[in-house]
Image (spheres, rainbow, N blue to C red):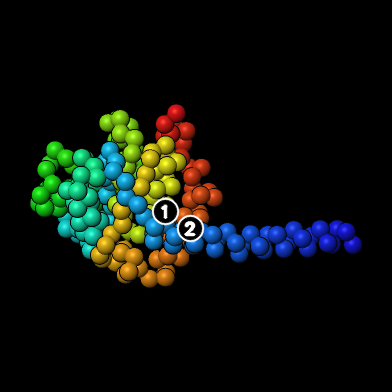
Amino acid sequence: MFVFRFIRRIIGFITLLIIIVPLYAVGNTWYTANNLNPVKSDVIVVLGAAQFDGRPSDLLLARLEIASTNYKNKLAPVIYTVGAGAPGDRSTEAAAGYNWLVANGVPKKSIQAIPKGRDTLSSTEAYVAAMNKAKFTSVLIVTDSYHCLRAMTMAKDLSVSASCADSQSGPGALENSKLRYLLRESAAYLAYVTVGRFGISLSDRVI
């Protein structure tokens, strides 16, 4: 009888975890997106999104606009644009972002394009490596509202102080994001904190 009660308790505990953990991820992702506090930093990083032959998609354009505004408001003296290209592309996400910023009044000397990264983690590792080389320790990440929690968590796991400024227009803006974006990003955050963060090698960390 004791064994059966013990098994029932274990099953109940596991069931509770299955319910509570995803709810926590959704709640944390939602709360972060609705309570962002951009902080003056060493560098602004624009996380990549789709580009079409050098022309930023609506998603990327919205991020670039916020990055430009934050640069002009002196929240950081340097902007990194990050992101590789898809197979067959003639341009990269980083290059598309760099060219747009230059065309919209940001000096070339204040921008560095980092044409690496096809996902958030590889992009984070790429820009943190550039930050370490420049001896930067704080970053203002520009991305979509619900993406901010995961992006900041990855940066902090690589020993970088991070805050986030979210898109104010386009499909990634909070007011335009649908429930499925929240659920998708919550699932991606949960996957990262439970499994993905262990893919960061010790050599990538700042000791």
* Secondary structure type for disc 2: helix
| Residue at image location 20% in from the left, 44% down from the top | 74
Q: Is residue 90 left or right of residue 129?
A: left
Sequence order check, earlier mark of 2 and 1: 2
Q: Is residue 80 above or below residue 62?
A: above
Question: Disc 2 residue type?
Answer: Asn
State which quarter of the image contains the N terminus: bottom right
Q: Position of residue 43 (x, y in %)?
A: 27, 41
State which quarter of the image contains the C terminus: top left
Asked whether residue 9 is in view, the answer is yes
Q: Which picture quadrant has residue 51?
A: bottom left
Label 2 vs label 1: CA separation? 8 Å
> Badge 1, how many Cα within 10 Å: few under 14, some, many 20+?
many
Q: Is residue 154 left or right of residue 116?
A: right
| Residue at image location 44% in from the left, 60% down from the top | 31
Q: Is residue 48 left or right of residue 148?
A: left
Q: Which residue in the rendered view is the most extreme toward the right?
A: 1
Asked whether residue 122 is in view, the answer is no
Residue with the mark numbered 2? 28
| Residue at image location 68% in from the left, 59% down from the top | 14
In this view, the residue in front, 126 or 84, is 126
* Secondary structure type for disc 1: helix
In this view, the residue in front, 192 or 161, is 161
Residue with the mark numbered 1? 149
Q: Position of residue 98 (x, y in %)?
A: 17, 47
Q: Position of residue 30 (x, y in %)?
A: 44, 62
Question: Disc 1 residue type?
Answer: Leu
For the residues bearing labels 2 and 1, Cβ distance under 8 angstroms: yes
> Badge 2, how many Cα within 10 Å: few under 14, some, many 20+?
some
